[in-house]
Amino acid sequence: MDAKELRAYTLGELHKLLRQKREELQKLRYQNAQSPLPKAPSLIPALRRDIARILTVINEKRRAKST
């Protein structure tokens, strides 16, 4: 997801998406611990970047709201 796409979401939607991405990351980490992910080892870093983007947009919206 691009930051441009994320900026179109409301704060509530962003928090919901963040929760989903974190759960997905947790599942992937668990699967990777059991046996290495053969199909896409780059999924975990990609999810981490998505989470960081979501958090960045959430913080931008909070700062814009407070000023």
Image: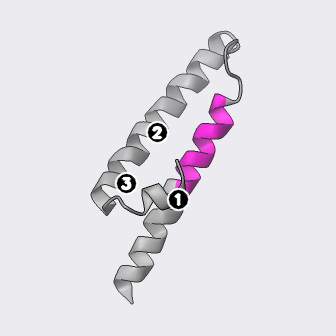
Q: Residue 21: which numbered mark, if any?
A: 2
The one of 16 and 4 positioned closer to us in this rendering: 4
Q: Which residue: 44% across, 33% down?
A: 23
> Is residue 23 placed above or below 16 in the rendered structure?
above
Q: Magenta includes 57? A: no
Question: Which stretch appears magenta?
Answer: 43-53
Pointer 1 local density, CA inside 10 Å: few below 14, some 14–19, many at least 20: few
Residue 20, picture quadrant = top left
Three-letter amino acid code at disc 1?
A: Ala
Looking at the rendered image, the quarter that the C terminus falls into is bottom left
Q: Residue 51: which numbered mark, if any?
A: none
Tell me where residue 10 appears, x and y as whole percent.
Answer: 30, 61
Give the spatial CA distance, label 3 vs label 2.
10 Å
Q: Which residue: 53% across, 48% down?
A: 51
The one of 32 and 10 positioned closer to us in this rendering: 10
The one of 2 and 46 positioned closer to us in this rendering: 2
Q: Which residue is mark 3?
A: 14
Three-letter amino acid code at disc 3?
A: Leu
- 25 on left or right of 67: right
Tag nearer the camera, 2 or 1:
1
Question: In terms of secondary structure, what is the magenta stretch mainly?
Answer: helix
N-term mark: 2 or 1: 1
Three-letter amino acid code at disc 2?
A: Lys
Q: Which residue is mark 1?
A: 3
Tell me where residue 29 appears, x and y as whole percent.
Answer: 60, 25
Q: Which residue: 46% across, 39% down?
A: 21
Q: Secondary structure at mark 1?
A: helix
> Is residue 20 placed above or below 5 in the rendered structure?
above
N-term mark: 3 or 1: 1
Pointer 2 local density, CA inside 10 Å: few below 14, some 14–19, many at least 20: some
> Is residue 56 placed above or below 52 in the rendered structure?
below
